[in-house]
Amino acid sequence: MTSKSPLNNSNITLDKEEIGVIYRKTERLTLLILMVALPLFGVVYLYDTSGNLNWDLPRLPGFIHGFLIGFSVVFLIGQYLIFHQKLKLTFSSEHLLEKVRIYSEATNQRYLFLFIVSIFATIGLLFNQNPVYTVIFAVTLVFFSLAKPSPDRMARLMKLKKEDRELIREASRPRDN
């Protein structure tokens, strides 16, 4: 067990503050991406299902249609695999702060992949009105939901000890200004 010296406590306080900053930046990015992706797809989906509007948009050529579907599926699978591969790096790290940095970078990258998929789905639905794009977006929403950072999710995925779990939970709480 580590000793509770003043120096050790100040390091824990500094780590907690830095973890809080990292957590809030990651959370802010994930919410921003969702705030852009959801309304964009929502407007296109409503346009597609209304039947009242006709923007006379050209249909995408077959190879672009195939590209959008294919790359969407590849990105959906890839974001999952890459995230979990990067997450394994946290198991070899001793320091909680480093683990949180790795988790944050992996989550940011994952959300950017998911954002790209949501844009592909939006463009595909807009130009081709194919319900496959709605399914792709629905799967993307599931991953958005599963990937959203939370203290409990971070602790579970990084397999943290009880004291580190509590430190993450404290660091993620809103600051009193």
Image (cartoon, helix red, strand yellow):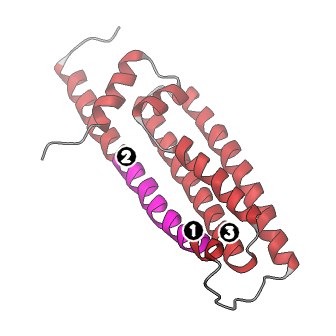
- Which numbered disc, 3 or 1, marks the residue closer to the eye? 1
- Residue lying at 55% horizontally and 46% vertically, measured from the top left: 106
The N terminus lies in which quarter of the figure? Answer: top left
Q: Is mark 1 on a helix, strand or loop?
A: helix
Q: Which residue lies furthest to the bottom in this view?
A: 56
Q: Name the residue under label 2.
A: 22
Separation of disc 3 and disc 2 at Cα? Answer: 29 Å
Residue 148 on image: x %, y %: 49, 44
The three-letter code of the residue at mark 2 reads Ile
- Residue lying at 47% horizontally and 67% vertically, measured from the top left: 36
Q: Name the residue under label 1.
A: 41
Mark nearer the N terminus (1 vs 2): 2
Please give the range of residues in magenta.
24-45
Say if mark 3 contacts mark 2, CB within 8 Å: no
In this rendering, the answer to whether 101 lies above or below 151 is below
Say if mark 1 contacts mark 2, CB within 8 Å: no
The three-letter code of the residue at mark 1 reads Phe
- Residue lying at 31% horizontally and 46% vertically, measured from the top left: 21
Q: What element carries label 2?
A: helix
The three-letter code of the residue at mark 3 reads Phe
Q: Residue furthest right?
A: 62
Give the class, few, some or many, for how many residues have Cα within 10 Å of label 3's Cα (few <14, many ≥20).
many
The circle drawn on residue 138 is none
Looking at the picture, tell me which residue is in the foreground, 91 or 50.
50
Q: What main secondary structure does the magenta stretch of the protein show?
A: helix
Residue 84's quadrant in the figure? top right
Q: Mark 3 points at which residue?
A: 120
